[in-house]
Image: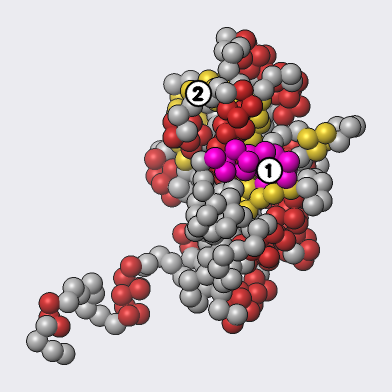
Amino acid sequence: MNRFSECRPRLFGGSRDEEVESRFPLAHADGNAQKRLLLGYPINFNSPPEAFFRWREQLQNKGIGRFAWNNGGNPYQPAPVSYNSHAYERELIERFGKIYRFPAGQLWGFLSNSGTDSNMQGMYMGRTLLKGRTGRLPKCYFTREAHYSIQILTDQLGLESVFVDTLPDAGLDPQDLARKMAANRNDPVLVVATVGTTFKGGIDRIEKIQEVVQGQPAYVHVDAALFGGYLPHTLFAPAVHYTGGEACRPRYDSLAVSCHKFFGFHSPAGLFISSKATFDEFNRLFSRVHSPEYIGHVPGTIACSRDAVKPAEFYYYSSPEDLARQAGEVKVMLGNTQYLLKALQTHFPQLLPRRVNEASNIVFFKQPAPWIVNKYSLATMKLAGVDFAHVVVMPHVTQSVIDEFLSDLEEGSHG
Ligand SMILES: Cc1ncc(COP(=O)(O)O)c(C=O)c1O
């Protein structure tokens, strides 16, 4: 103590343990009653296996996460600062690139801060490429089922949004896309296709989009924030494959997947992957707006400094043993989704329960009593003037929690 110390700001009077306890009264390292009941948002609250924490410890023993490591720059270029995890970042992208059927060695990508961040990269690349090819800014086409971040990003990029109608399964209506494109025939076309729309779980059919945009200057970015994590382990994997069809042709230009959604990574992060040819064309144009002098190369990414800890940690999720664990979780998760749907259809048909396709882990229904919405943190939305809610059956959602939810619906329907 000295005569100035009483002027120091004091955040809390008790011990450090008491302070942490007071700030996070509900949290507990191994889980708590609260998180098992979170049904309304696409976050997997399961903790990864112990092997992940051992891997993390190994990384920390090497100093990763103990001081200011930085993945600034293109992970495929020599780095200006040697304390980076570019090698793991590249390997991670190569491993997931293989899962999404990008040709080996012909892809580019990085680990971003989130699905939104990956969407920003994809939409910026599309905008830059199309402007470079045609001299005109594209119009940005997406449906009202797309995540709200797409509207923010369109605004940020100074692009005009063109809303495309949806089909009854919540996927983009290709005929309406054709109509809307015809009304804007002089402008190049940036399509943001969603594989797994946020509220309903709709899937935009990329083949149909490609048929419509064929012959036009176009770029298709795929937002597979949630579904991109688990579809590769299912029959529906082709929906997120980069190449497909008999000719094994590219189906889209870039892909965004969130790491904290299906994978349950402890911190927001996103995968961004495009082909190398797409990236190279973009980066040549990018070099006109970005001087390479400071770091010795044109980075390709919008952000300068990037986290080095997350790519090294998330690398664990690309390991064969963890992919096998994820495949098991997907089976249970989709089984539980079907269980919830069937129970709702059987016992609560008045709630109009719906799952728009068999690949989806989302069931939506008429909004129940407010105490049920609160207890399970359900996301709600008005659809055609009627209040709806949804359950996203993530890997932490067990059949016993679904049963508890169904009992509460029963109780709520009497109240
Ligand atoms: C389809 C879709 N895209 C993008 C996002 C945003 O992802 P993030 O939270 O990783 O920024 C979400 C989030 O729910 C989403 O559902």
The amino acid marked with disc number 2 is Ser
Looking at this rendering, what residue extends furthest in the front direction? 293
Direction from residue 68 to residue 392 in the image, left or right: right
Q: Residue at x 76, y 33 (%)?
A: 251
Provide residue 77's location: percent of width, then percent of height.
65, 58
Query: Which quadrant of the rendered structure holds the N terminus?
Result: bottom left
The amino acid marked with disc number 1 is Asp
- Residue 31 within the magenta-colored segment of the rendering: no
Judge by depth and name the residue closer to the eye, 148 or 359.
Answer: 148
- Whether disc 1's CB lies below 8 Å from ligand 1 is answered no
Give the SS element for disc 2.
strand
Q: Which residues are magenta?
A: 273-288
Provide residue 172's location: percent of width, then percent of height.
64, 24
Residue 65 vs 295, above or below: the answer is: below
Direction from residue 160 to residue 338 in the image, left or right: right
Judge by depth and name the residue closer to the eye, 57 or 413.
Answer: 57
Provide residue 406's location: percent of width, then percent of height.
55, 44
- Whether disc 2's CB lies below 8 Å from ligand 1 is answered no
